[in-house]
Image (cartoon, grey):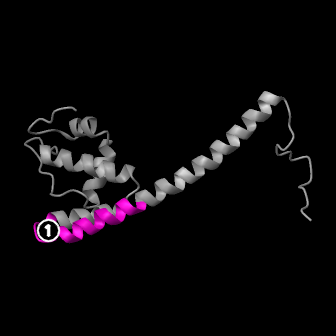
Amino acid sequence: MESIAEEMSIGEVANVTGLSVHALRFFEREGLLLRDIPRGGTRHRVYAPADVEWLKLCNRFRASGMPLATIRTFADLVRAGPGNEAERLAVLQNHEQQMRDRIASLYTDLQVIHEKAIAYERHVQDGTTDGVWDPTQPPAVKA
C-alpha cells in the first residue's frame, strides 16, 4: 500500500486512489467528500491523508455498485458527526445485502454458463452437433 504524505495535490491523490482528476472534482461538486478541500497558496486543492482514505472508501463503494445518492447519504451522516451510527450501519447493511443478492444471482448465472460450456465441450470432444442449438432448424414442438 502506498503511503500518504501529509498534504497532497489533486494529481497525487488521483495517482494514489486510481480516481481521475475529473472524478475527484466531480466527487467534490456532488458533496461526496467529508469536508471542503482547502486550497494552498497556489490556489490548488490540498488533500489531507483522511481525505485520501475517504476517497479510497468511496471508490470501493462505487466499485461495489453503491449508487452515488447512497454514498452521499452516508457522507452526510459521517459529516454530521457522532450520534447517527445506527443510521450509518443501516446504510452499510442495506448495501451489503444488495451485494450478497447480486453475488448470488451472478453465481446462478455462472452455473448456467458453466453447464452450457460442459455440454459444448462434450459436443466438441465427441464431434457431434446433436442437441446443439441450430438456428437453421425449427424449434422442437413438445407434445
> In screen coordinates, is 80 left or right of 98?
left
Q: Secondary structure at mark 1?
A: helix
Residue position for label 1: 80
**Front-most of residues 132 and 71:** 132
Give yes or no for residue 91 being in the magenta stretch: yes
> In this view of the protein, can residue 95 be seen by the observer?
yes
Residue 55 picture location, percent across and down: 24, 48
| Dominant secondary structure (helix, strand or loop) of the stretch shown in magenta | helix
Q: How many marks?
A: 1
> In this view of the protein, can residue 46 be seen by the observer?
no
Amino acid type at image mark 1? Ala
Q: Choose top left, top right, bottom left or bottom right for residue 74.
A: bottom left
**Front-most of residues 142 and 76:** 142
Q: Quadrant of the C terminus?
A: bottom right
Q: Choose top left, top right, bottom left or bottom right for residue 32.
A: bottom left
**Front-most of residues 41 and 58:** 58
Q: Residue at x 19, y 46 (%)?
A: 53
Span highlighted in magenta in the image: 79-98
> In screen coordinates, is 29 left or right of 132?
left
Q: Residue at x 31, y 48 (%)?
A: 59
Q: Quadrant of the N terminus?
A: top left
Give yes or no for residue 82 being in the magenta stretch: yes
Residue 77 picture location, percent across and down: 20, 67
Q: Residue at x 64, y 45 (%)?
A: 113
Q: Residue at x 16, y 71 (%)?
A: 84
